[in-house]
Amino acid sequence: ETGVTQTPRHLVMGMTNKKSLKCEQHLGHNAMYWYKQSAKKPLELMFVYSLEERVENNSVPSRFSPECPNSSHLFLHLHTLQPEDSALYLCASSQGLLSPATNEKLFFGSGTQLSVL
Amino acid sequence: GQQVMQIPQYQHVQEGEDFTTYCNSSTTLSNIQWYKQRPGGHPVFLIQLVKSGEVKKQKRLTFQFGEAKKNSSLHITATQTTDVGTYFCAGPRGGGNKLTFGTGTQLKVEL
């Protein structure tokens, strides 16, 4: 148990569906992240939030829409996805934003394994 | 853009053998972090290195940061089956609030 909880653990959806991934952290952290992990590819940063403000949108298609209602919760809304979007979506948090001057580290959730049919 | 490559991509060893993964960045890094992801699991932070030439040890794991701060290595002495997983290095980019993860090295340990 890392203190970062993601639901659902597995999700199968059609290309016309709308679904949402949920992440909740119980660590009192101020920064939250969405990462995408595809087979045989490095972890890809998608979004960064700090104190509910989006500070990074890493050229992610608009069919992925993040929402951060408070510093403990992060959502990823999915709409009209493509089969190539099938991947493990990982949520992470850190006390503050990562910085070269600090020892901040990422705490990952268990991820949502997404399959788009 | 910044790229972080790791070699080898895969490594199979017999239990008790040593293992090393190497991480190389196209740009100088202010620091480097290492994470381990067990099969079916999520990445877990192992360590952060900051100083040029820094060496840190965690039991059988030895982490090293290169003098030029563009490369790093993780060495495991006498591997055990519990060491199985994928090891990632990660370095900050941009304003530092983003981590670029390496391609990872998948370690399998056979009895």
Image (spheres, rainbow, N blue to C red):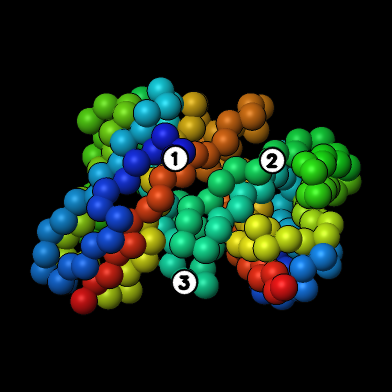
Q: Which mark is residue A21?
A: none
Q: Name the residue: 39% across, 38% down.
A: A4
The total number of labels drawn is 3
| Front residue of A35 and B63 | B63
- Find the residue positioned furthest to the front: B111
Confirm or deny contact between disc 2 and disc 1 (CB under 8 A).
Answer: no
Q: Which quadrant would residue B5 be assigned to in this image?
A: bottom right
Confirm or deny contact between disc 3 and disc 1 (CB under 8 A).
Answer: no
Looking at the rendered structure, the secondary structure element under dot 2 is strand
Q: Which residue is mark 1?
A: A1
- Chain under numbered label 3: A
Q: CA distance from mark 2 to mark 1?
A: 19 Å
Q: Amino acid at mark 3?
A: Ala
Residue B75 picture location, percent across and down: 81, 56
Q: Which residue is mark 3?
A: A39
Q: Nearer the viewer, mark 3 or mark 1?
A: 1
Q: Nearer the viewer, mark 2 or mark 1?
A: 1
Q: Name the residue: 82% across, 40% down.
A: B56
Q: CA distance from mark 2 to mark 3?
A: 24 Å
Q: Do tags 2 and 3 sit on the same chain? A: no
Residue B45 vertical position relative to residue B106 in the rendered view, above or below: above
Q: Which residue is mark 2?
A: B47
Q: Amino acid at mark 2?
A: Ile
Q: Name the residue: 77% across, 73% down.
A: B14
Q: Which quadrant would residue A86 be assigned to in this image?
A: bottom left
Looking at the rendered structure, the secondary structure element under dot 3 is loop
Q: Amino acid at mark 1?
A: Glu
- Chain under numbered label 1: A
Residue A66 vertical position relative to residue A38 in the rendered view, above or below: above
Task: Left or right? Give the position of A85 relative to B87.
Answer: left
